[in-house]
Amino acid sequence: MTRGGQGLARVAVVVRAGAAPLWWLGVCAAGVGVLAPGLTGRRIGVLAGAALFVLATAVVAYGGRKRYVTLAASASRAGKHDVLQDRAVTVRNWRRHHRWWLLLAFLAALGAAFALPAAGGLLLAGCGAGLWLKAAWLGRRERAGEALVWVRVDWLRGGAGSPAGKQVKAYRSTGIAAGDAAPGGARRKSPALV
């Protein structure tokens, strides 16, 4: 970065980065957890897990939307010296900073199976599904506004992986074809023409 440029990461990519690990760790924990009879029995554990899955999905998908909308509405245009971080780098950084939290969440979900079989895993999977839904919502907003929203990389450091957390003061925006990720944070199916 030169002349005052900032490293920028896509907001939707940061949101989406935790979705796959949470989903798969949750599915694995639920699969292993259903093998244990638990204190309540499998049927009650799975039913409670299904309710937790739906609740977690809704809370994560809809939580904090007002802050995202406020930051996106006041986004300033990215400068020519700003460096747009690749999707793979953003995902790798988020997962590296959160690996211990993911491991602890997985172990907690496995431990919860002794009380409610599969419930902890389904809760974890619901958090992953909620992140996917939130990223998809961000993608629809980006398409509608024909602008991608970015957050400064230095505001995501130190384990602060939320692109709408207190440390984030503002977003930057670019055209819809900038970067290597499609609206919503998924990989682009074909190279963007810039």
Image: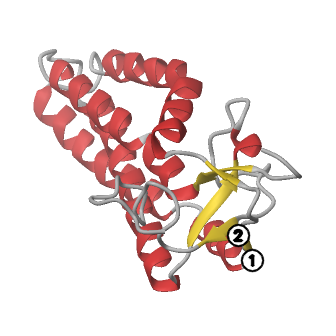
Residue at image coords 22%, 25%: 28
Sort mark 2 into few (<14), some (14-19) or many (20+) by Cα contacts within 10 Å: many
Q: Which residue is mark 2?
A: 71
Number of callouts in the render?
2
Sort mark 1 into few (<14), some (14-19) or many (20+) by Cα contacts within 10 Å: few
Q: Position of residue 101 (x, y in %)?
A: 53, 24
User: 141 or 38, which lies in front?
Assistant: 141
Q: Is residue 117 visible?
A: no
Q: Which residue is mark 1?
A: 74
**Marks 2 and 1, Cα distance to the nearest angstrom?**
5 Å
Q: Position of residue 175 (x, y in %)?
A: 56, 74
- The outermost residue toward the right is 3
- Disc 2 vs disc 1: Cβ atoms closer than 8 Å? yes
- Left or right, 40 with reference to 183: left
User: 70 or 36, which lies in front?
Assistant: 70
Residue at image coords 46%, 84%: 144
Task: Please tell me whether mark 1 sits on a helix, a strand or a loop.
Answer: loop
Q: Amino acid at mark 1?
A: Ser
